Amino acid sequence: MQVEGRRWQRYVALGDSFTEGLMDASADDPDSFVGWADLLAARLARRNTRAGLDFGYANLAVRGRVLADVAGPQLDAALDLAPDLVSISAGGNDLLRPRVSLAEVADGLEAAVARVRETGADVLMVTAPDIGWMPIVGRVNPRMAELTAHVWGIAQRHDCPVVDLWTLRELQDLRMWAPDRIHFSSRGHRVVADAAAWTLGLDDVEPLEALPPATPLTRLASMAANREWARTHLAPWVHRHMRGRSSGDGRSAKRPVVAPVDLGG
């Protein structure tokens, strides 16, 4: 579904590491991240600038946050900023827990969307990507599929545009993903931003140059890569969660207030 004829002047992004922008490192500061929402905000800002309209953007997303965080404190802070466009992508971290009620996640997500829509603001929703093809982490794909179905239903009931990552075949390539196989690479974030921009009716989306075919791994090379991934990324994640810790502990939003977007002159 594509939106046509709407313009927004105050965009607030809510969510977890996906919307914070991990692992799309900034060229100016490798310890900070850009990501799809920042890229989308820049495009919205450029369109408004051409039309002589103001534009401001805040990104309240923080890595590791679960739906209760996003639909609670983040949403409260967002509504205080009086946005006319809010993007909400949440629930992914809930799905990674050993036990989760998808119905409760969906109910919480819908309640958050309803709160925003009651203000008159538009809500941009994002489906989960299809990761059934991905080694090991693809085991969570049935939950991703169920969450995606809920996103479409919520969007239909509340008249929300949806960024459809589930059928975006470009993302079914490991080069679109960071080495941890959980976050997108810089190119992956660009592809998501392109999809979001198209969904919101922006006409300045320039397709990326196609990647050459990936070199297939031998069975032994694939097994070795999976072992290295488990040692480098999976084991630390499990250890951290067994201790009840999150990668977002002690972190705050990178753009906590609505402010102009730097378009580089």
Image (cartoon, rainbow, N blue to C red):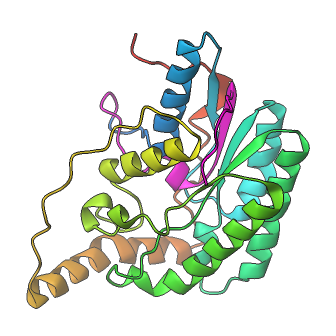
Numbered range of the magenta stretch: 1-29
Q: Is residue 55 magenta?
A: no
Question: Is residue 168 shown left or right of residue 210?
Answer: right
Which residue occupies the foreground of this view, 236 or 65? 65
Q: Is residue 109 visible?
A: no
Rendered image quadrant of residue 149:
bottom right
Q: Is residue 14 magenta?
A: yes
The quadrant the C terminus occupies is top left
The quadrant the N terminus occupies is bottom right
* Name of the residue lying farthest toward the right: 118
Which residue occupies the foreground of this view, 36 or 238? 36
Rendered image quadrant of residue 10:
top right
With respect to residue 103, does 154 lie above or below?
above
- Picture coordinates of residue 116, whole percent (x, y): 83, 46
Question: Is residue 231 shown left or right of residue 41?
Answer: left
With respect to residue 198, does 210 lie above or below?
below
* Name of the residue lying farthest toward the bottom: 219
Residue at 56% across / 47% down in the picture?
199
Number of numbered discs present?
0
- Picture coordinates of residue 220, whole percent (x, y): 10, 89
Q: Is residue 237 visible?
A: yes
Question: Is residue 68 shown left or right of residue 179?
Answer: right
* Name of the residue lying farthest toward the front: 4
Residue at 32% across / 37% down in the picture?
30
- Picture coordinates of residue 185, whole percent (x, y): 33, 54
Residue at 25% across / 61% down in the picture?
175
Most frequent secondary structure within the magenta stretch: loop
Residue at 31% across / 43% down in the picture?
207
With respect to residue 234, does 160 lie above or below?
above
- Picture coordinates of residue 192, whole percent (x, y): 44, 51
